[in-house]
Each structure stands twice: as C-alpha cells, then as structure tokens.
Image (cartoon, rainbow, N blue to C red):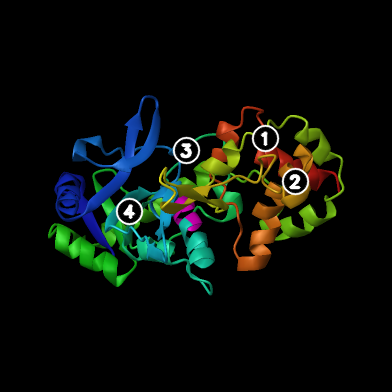
C-alpha cells in the first residue's frame, strides 16, 4: 500500500479522532520516566519519548488477568473470562513491535491462547521509528529489531514538520482513512526526506557486539560450563526485575483465588520470573535451578538460544530494559561479549 504523509498540525486531530471511537494507549511522562498509559488528552501524548519503563506487551498479555470463574456446589459451573476491548497502541517503537510479533508466534501460533488471541485481534498497532538511540543501554541494531515493521498496522517516521506514514495492513488503512482526511500520498520530497532520516540513523546507531547474532546460539552453547556464569551470578539478587521489564518474557503462574464462602473462585494468571528462587521448584522440594548462576544462565540461554530454536526468532530485541533496571548493573551486552571473548 502506498505511503502517506501527515502534517504535525493534523496529527493531534487524528489522535483525537482515534480517541473518540476506542481506547488509545500511548507514551506519557511519569515524573522523569515514560510509560504506556491510556490517553485522557492528546496533550499527554509524548511522541518524543526515548523508551518506556514497561513495554506495551501488558495490553495484550496483562500482568494479572482472570482466565475463568467457577462456582462449586452439587455441580461445578465454569465461566471462561476473556476481556478484549478494542484498543489502539500508538507510538510503539520497533523493538516493542518485534517483541509483540514474537508473542504472536508463541501465543497465537499452533497452540492458540484464546485470551491473548482475542486481545491481539482487537489491537491496532501504530509504530513510531527511532531516529536516534534511546540511550546507552540499547543494542537493537545488533539484535535486528531496529528496522522491524511486521506486526504493526501503521508505522510513522518523524520528518520534522510531518510524519511519513507507512500503511502496512488493510486494517491500518481503514483506521487512517476513518480518523483523518488530511493524510496525503507521499511525494518525491517526502521519500527523499525519509531517506535522509535513514542515512542519519545509520550514522547514529552503532553495533555493540563483535559478532553476528546468528552465531549467538553456538557461542552460548560453548559457554554452558563457563565460570563466567558463576562470577556474574554472584552479583545477581534474583529480584526478577529483568524478566518483569522484558518485552518478550512470557512465563506465567496460575493460581486459584477462592472466595471466603469457599463456594466460588477465580483462576488467575500472573507474570512470573525464572530468576526467582522457587520458579523451578517442584513437588518434594527439588529445585532444578537452585543456584543464582544457573537461573541467570538460563535467562541468557532463553533469550539467545532456546526461543530461537523453538520459534525461529531471537528472544531478545535489544531494548536494554533489563540492563536499565538491574540493581546489580549486570549488562547483557557485556555478558555476551565476555562469553564470546572466552571461547
């Protein structure tokens, strides 16, 4: 589909029109950080944000959600719970689009999760390109997510006084046409301006890994018994912050929350973390990853090897959120470089 351009002066009315018909979430300021939140006003939207604390994953895979409710008596009455309101996710960066694209494969592939699939089918994603690195922690260029588009419906590139709009899906075209008549077909000067932005990006982003990530599974495999994991593991607090901020982590726990009457209950799914000490504990008290170093190694293997082998896509998008929140200052880039250098 042909690209369009939308003037900055027409962008606020476009967002306002979106908000008039559905829930719109986008980046907003929260003290000195940024978060994805439902927009109450167009003025709250910050399209100049570097990166958010949590990814917009939470809108298709919530931190806590009810899966079913049931009543117990002479018979058990089950009521599946699927909450999937229509929603526009606005201003999503390429790394987070790549993460949702991976979750689509995991949750809506051969074994479909009905709750995820319902929410995803109701979500329109409007991406926003990164014209410069968000900060020193990102390594999206290395992980291949910087140019990512697949999974988005529309994709915006900031050209200064206007947005270059890539129309990626029929649903994206429908949303754009319904919300504004101001989007014009992209002309030669618009295409040239976008090319200038791409060239500026090429100068702004730099690789941080000395190897192609296609070799990462092999590098990790050879490092399995390395003492590096023990050394880094001694620094780890096993707090789970890396997992909880990661846009591709999808492990969860399921609990039955029983009412005081013992006659009704709700089955709830919550995000979980493989870095917590009891994550791999089973009946009888056996724990397959009792040591911090084992849990740390497992997380890196998940991101750089296991998910790739299972789903054909890298489990890390290089957003750097795990490094930003790590109280022990454990760096993914430094860890990958250490194990590569120890071969």
Q: Is residue 106 magenta?
A: no
**Rendered image: mark on residue 156:** 4
Which residue bears the numbered disc 3? 134
Residue 266, image x, y percentages? 42, 52
The total of numbered circles placed on residues is: 4
Residue drawn at point x = 61 percent, y = 51 percent:
142
Ranked by sequence position, the earlier of labels 3 and 2 is 3
Q: For the residues carrying marks 1 and 2, which lies nearer the camera in this image?
A: 1
Q: Is residue 283 above or below residue 75?
A: above
Q: In which image quadrant can residue 326 be found?
A: top right
**Mark 3, mark 1: which one is toward the viewer?**
1
Q: Residues within 10 Å of mark 2 (few under 14, many from 20)?
A: many
In the picture as drawn, the residue positioned furthest to the bottom comes out as 110
- Counting residues from the start of the chain, the first of labels 3 and 4 encountered is 3
**In whole angstroms, how far apart are the C-alphas of marks 1 and 2?**
12 Å
Q: Quadrant of residue 213?
A: bottom right
**Could you tell which of marks 1 and 2 lies nearer the N-terminus?**
1
């Amino acid at each position: 589909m042909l690209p369009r351009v939308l003037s900055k002066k027409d962008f606020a009315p476009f967002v306002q029109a979106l908000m008039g018909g559905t829930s719109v979430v986008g980046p907003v300021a929260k003290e000195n950080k940024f978060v994805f939140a439902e927009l109450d006003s167009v003025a709250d939207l910050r399209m100049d944000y570097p990166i958010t604390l949590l990814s917009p994953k939470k809108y298709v895979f919530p931190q806590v959600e009810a899966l079913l409710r049931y009543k117990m008596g002479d018979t058990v009455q089950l009521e599946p719970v699927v909450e999937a309101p229509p929603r526009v996710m606005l201003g999503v960066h390429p790394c987070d689009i790549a993460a949702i694209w991976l979750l689509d494969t995991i949750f809506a592939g051969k074994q479909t999760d009905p709750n995820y699939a319902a929410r995803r089918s109701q979500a329109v994603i409007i991406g926003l390109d990164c014209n410069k690195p968000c900060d020193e922690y990102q390594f999206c260029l290395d992980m291949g997510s910087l140019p990512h588009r697949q999974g988005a419906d529309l994709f915006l590139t900031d050209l200064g006084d206007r947005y270059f709009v890539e129309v990626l899906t029929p649903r994206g075209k429908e949303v754009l046409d319904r919300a504004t008549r101001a989007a014009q077909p992209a002309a030669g000067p618009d295409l040239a301006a976008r090319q200038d932005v791409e060239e500026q990006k090429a100068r702004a982003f730099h690789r941080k890994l000395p190897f192609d990530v296609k070799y990462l599974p092999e590098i990790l495999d050879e490092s399995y018994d390395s003492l590096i994991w023990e050394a880094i593991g001694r620094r780890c607090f096993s707090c789970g912050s890396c997992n909880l901020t990661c846009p591709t982590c999808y492990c969860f726990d399921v609990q039955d929350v029983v009412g005081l009457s013992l006659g009704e209950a709700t089955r709830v799914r919550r995000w979980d973390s493989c870095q917590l000490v009891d994550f791999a504990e089973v009946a009888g008290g056996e724990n397959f990853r009792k040591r911090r170093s084992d849990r740390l190694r497992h997380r890196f293997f998940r991101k750089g090897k296991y998910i790739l082998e299972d789903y054909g896509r890298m489990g890390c998008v290089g957003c750097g959120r795990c490094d930003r929140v790590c109280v022990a200052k454990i760096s993914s880039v430094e860890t990958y470089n250490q194990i590569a250098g120890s071969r």
